[in-house]
Image: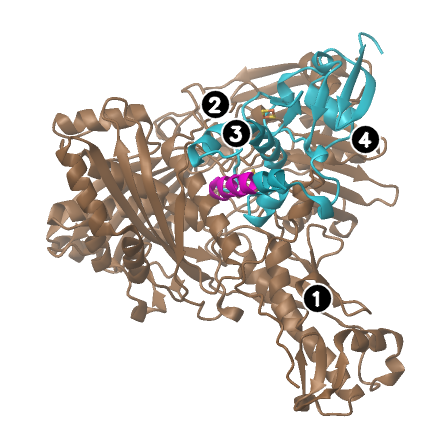
Amino acid sequence: MSNTSEVRIQINGEVFERHVEPRKLLSDFIREDAALTGTHVGCEHGACGACTVLLDGEPVRSCLMFAAQADGMVLETVESLASTPANLHPIQEAFWEKHGLQCGFCTPGMLLTTKALLEKNPDPSEDEIRQAIAGNICRCTGYVFIVDAIKDAAARCSSEGDR
Amino acid sequence: MTQSLAPRLLGAKVKRVEDPRFLLGKARYIDDMVRPGMLHAAFLRSPIPHGNVRSVDVGPALAMERVRAALTGRDIATKVKPIVCDSTFEGFKSSNYHAIALDKVRYVGEALAIVAADTRYIAEDAIEMIEFDIDELGPVASIAAATREGAPLLHEHWGDNFFIEDLLEAGDVESAFRDAHGVFEINVSNQRHSGIPLETRGVIAEFDSDGVLTMWSATQIPHMVRTGMADCLEVPEHKIRVIAPDVGGGFGPKGHLFPEELAVCQLAIETGRPIKWIEDRREHMLSTFHAREHYHRVKVAYTEEGVVTALDATIEVDCGAYSIYPWTAAMDVEMGLVMLPGPYKIRNFRCEAQSVATNKCPFGAYRGVARTAVCFSIERIMDQVANKVGLDPVEVRRRNLIRSDEFPYMSITGMEYDSGSLIESLDKVCDEADYKAMRQFQEEARSEGRMVGIGVSVFTEQTAPPADKGLPLNFSWDAATVRMDPSGKVVVQVGTHSHGQGHETTLAQIVADELELPLADVRIAFGDTESTPNGIGTFASRSAVVAGSASYLAAVSVKENLTERAAHLLEASVEDVEVKAGRISVKGAPEQSVSIAEVARISYHHPELLDPSMEPLLEAVATYNAGPGTYANSAQIALIEVDAETGKFKILRYLVVEDCGQMINPTIVDGQVHGGIAQGLGGALFEELIYDDEGQLLTTTFLDYLMPGATDIPNIEVSHLVTPSAFVPNGIKGMGEGGAVAPGAVLACAIEDAIKPIGEVFVDRTPLTPERVVRFIEAASSGGGVE
Ligand code: FES
Ligand code: FES
C-alpha cells in the first residue's frame, strides 16, 4: 500500500502496531484497526464529543486527530472501564442507577469525560459538571439525569477512595 | 401458609436491563458491524438545488484502484422504482422520489451516484472523480418563491407547486365572528429544524445466493421499510429481511424509507458483495428529512370573558422536494388542521392548509409532528386574549380548557379525546412552581429593573394515533409474540423498536407481572423482521400503548394455557387454580401446586401427560389496536430572566406536569420528558436549518447548526398526575413526544412577559435567538410591531 506509515498506539494496555495512511483518523484507527467500537463518531468535526477518549489521561476528540499523531501514545477508551456487567466502574454504576443514558450513543464519551473531571475535581458542583460536559452532546436525555449520575459517580468514587 | 406476592413491576422505577451493554461500549450500532467481503459506499450529492440532469459519468471513478462499483440514476432506472407516497385526499399530487436522481435534481444533497470501494476513504476519493452535467433551473427556496406568479415548477406536470390544498370547516365561523366581543389576527412561524440523532443514518445490505436481501439499517420502522423496499426493488417481500440493531436515537427522522436504503441495496444486489454506507454529519444535515417549518395565520374571535369562540386559520408547510414514505407530504398539514384547537373548547373552526413543494430537503417526521407548531399558535392566541381582556395567562387558559368531566370529548375537528386532566395539570404545575411566589419574585425583580418573565403552556398529546386522516395506511395497531420455553422463561418479540426508550425494561415489566415471573425471566426482542411478528414500528408515542398492550394480551393468553395445563396436572378445574409468584396452585390449598417451569417442561417434553386437546406449544401472538388513540396531557411553566443588552436569557426554572395515565416505569417517563423538553428548547432557542435564497443549506455542521448542550438546558422539574387511559389495558398512555411540544410556546409567552414593563410586543416566531430578542425589546420600546 502506498504512502503508509507504521504507528504504534497503546490502547487499554494493549499495543496496536499498524501501517496506516497519514489521513486515517484516530477514531477510525480505534474502531477499525483496534476493533474497539465503543468509541462513537457523531460529527467527525470535533463538535459532539461522542468520540472522546483519554490520551495520556486527558480527554481528546479522536475524530480531530490522525492516528499517526497518536504514535507512541497511551489511550484509554470506554472499554478500559470494565469488561463485564459484573465489574462495572463506579461511574458506569452511577449512570445506570440514575438513568444517565437512553440510546447510549453519547455514553462512552460522557463516561470518559466524567472520569477526567472527577480525577481533577472529585466533588464538582452542578455548574462545574455542566461546564465539564458542555462539549458532549446528548440528544436523548436533556442532561438532567446525566448531571445526577455524575454527582452520584463523584460520591461513589470518593467513597471507594476512602476505603 | 401464605404465598408471597411477586412485587408488582408495573409502575416501579426499575433500572434498565439493557444498560450494561451501552455502558460497556458493547452495544452494536450499524457502524460497529463488519460483514465478510464488505465494501464501503459513498454518495455523490447534488450541489445544485434545481436542475435537469444531462449526464453523470462514473467512468473516472471506476478507473481508480480499489473502486469496485458505481451506479447512477440511469443505471438503476429500470430496476428500482421511485418512492411514491400519496395521500388519499383528493387532489394530492404525486411525486416520484428516485433512489438516485434520474432526469432532475430537486434539492442540494439529492443523490446523483453511489460508489463502492474497499474503504470509505477511497469511496470518498472516487466521488470527487465523477463528472456530471446539470442544466440549472431557477431555485425555489421558500413558500413565497414557490407560490409567486411564474415560479419554476418542481414537478412540471402539476402545473403549480402545491402537494395538497385542504380545507376543514366546522361549526358556524361567520356568526361567531359576527357576535364576538373582539377579533384579532396572528401571523406566526416556526423555523425548519429536525431531530438530529447523535448517530447518523447507516445501512449495510447483503444479497445472498438464495436471493434473500438482508438490510441492516438504523431505522425505527423495520417492517414498514421492508414493505417499501418490496414496492421499489425487484425482490419480493418474503425474501427481504430488515434488521435494526442498536440505534443511536431516532426522534422521527429515522422513521422513513430512504432513497439511500434502496440505492445501497441495489448495489449489493448487483455486486453480490455486502455494502456498508455510513452517513456523515454533513450528509445528515443535507439529506435526512427536515421538519417543523410551519407558517400559520389565524383570525380569532373571543368573548368579553376571554373565551375563544372561533378560529379562522391558514396553515402553510414548506415540505421540500418530495412526498416521503410512509407519511406523505400531507402529514404536517393534516395533523395541524385537526390539532390546532388543541386542549381548548373551540366550537367554530375553519382552516385552510397547504403543503408546498420547494427545492429543499424533503420534510418528514420529528417528535411532536405539527403539534409543536399548533401548540405555538394556539398558545400565542391564548396569551393575546389574556392581554386583550386583562387576564392572567393561567386564568385565560383555565376558562378555555376542556374540563375533566367533559371527557370523552369530541373536538370540533373530529378528534376523540378519551380522557385527561388539563385544568388539574395546569393547577398542579402552578402549585409546584408556587405561581404566586413566582409572580411576586417577578414584581421585586422588575422593581430593580430586571427583566423577568413567566411563560406557561398546556396541551393534549395524541398518542398511539391511527393516522387515518389522508395517510395511505392506518397504523393504529402493533403485534407481539410471547414465547415460553421449556424452562418456563420467556422471550417477547415485538414489532416496535427501542432506540433509547427502554422497551427491554418496560415491556418486560408488563409481561413479567402478568405471568407472575421475575423480571430476569423475561427478555424482549425486536428489530428483526425475521423473528418478530409483522408490526408497524416506533413513532407517534405509540409503543407503550400498542406494543405494551399486545405483549400484555399475548401474555394473558399464555397464562391461560399454562393455567389450563396446570389444572389438568393438579386434577383441579381451571377456576380453582391461580398463578402466583412463579407457581400455579389450587386456591386455598397452596401445597397442591406446580411451578410454571414444571408445567412448561411437561408441556413441551411430555405432552402425553396433558389432555389430548392441549397443544404442547406455549406461545401466543397478539395484536392490539388502539383505535382512535389515547390522549395524554401536560402543562409546563418557565421562569426566565432576559439580559436586555444582549438578548440572551436564562431559564431560572422549568417545571412540567405530565399525565400519561398509568406509568410503566416513572424513571423512564421522566427521562423521556427531559429529553423531549431539551429538544423543544433547542428548537425554541437556536436550532435552525437555514437555506439561502439560492437553495443552498448554510447549516451543515454542528458549528453552524447549534445543538443544545448541558449549559443550555436547565434542570427540569417533573411531576405527575395519573388519569388512566379510558380504554387501553392497564390504563397506559403514550408520552414520548409531549415534552418537545410546548417549549416554544412557553418561552414566547415568557419573553413577552419579561418585556412587558418596556412595552407590548408580539413574539411571533422561533427561534428566540439573542438577536431576535433584542429586536423584540427594541420594538417594545418603540411602541410594538416587529418585522
Ligand atoms: S465525532 Fe468527534 S467530536 Fe463529534
Ligand atoms: S443517550 Fe442518546 S445521545 Fe445521549
Q: Are marks 1 and 2 in contact (CB under 8 Å)?
A: no
The structure residue drawn at horizontal position 77% and vertical position 19%, both measured from the top left corner, is A9
Q: Mark 1 lies on which chain?
A: B
User: Of residues B248 and B243, which is closer to you in this image?
Assistant: B248
Q: What stretch is highlighted in magenta?
A: A143-155
Residue A45 in percent (x, y) is at: 58, 20
Disc 2 marks which residue? Answer: B699
Q: Depth check: A123 or B613 in front?
A: A123
Badge 4 and badge 1 both on one subunit: yes
Q: Which amino acid does label 4 sit on?
A: Met
Cα distance, mark 2 to mark 4?
32 Å
Q: Colour in which chain A is shown?
A: cyan
Q: Earlier in the sequence, mark 1 or mark 2?
A: 1
Using the rendered image of the protein, determine whether residue B615 is visible from the camera's viewpoint: yes
Q: Which of marks 2 and 4 is nearer the N terminus?
A: 4
User: Which of the chains is brown?
Assistant: B
Q: Distance between the residues labelled 3 and 1?
A: 49 Å
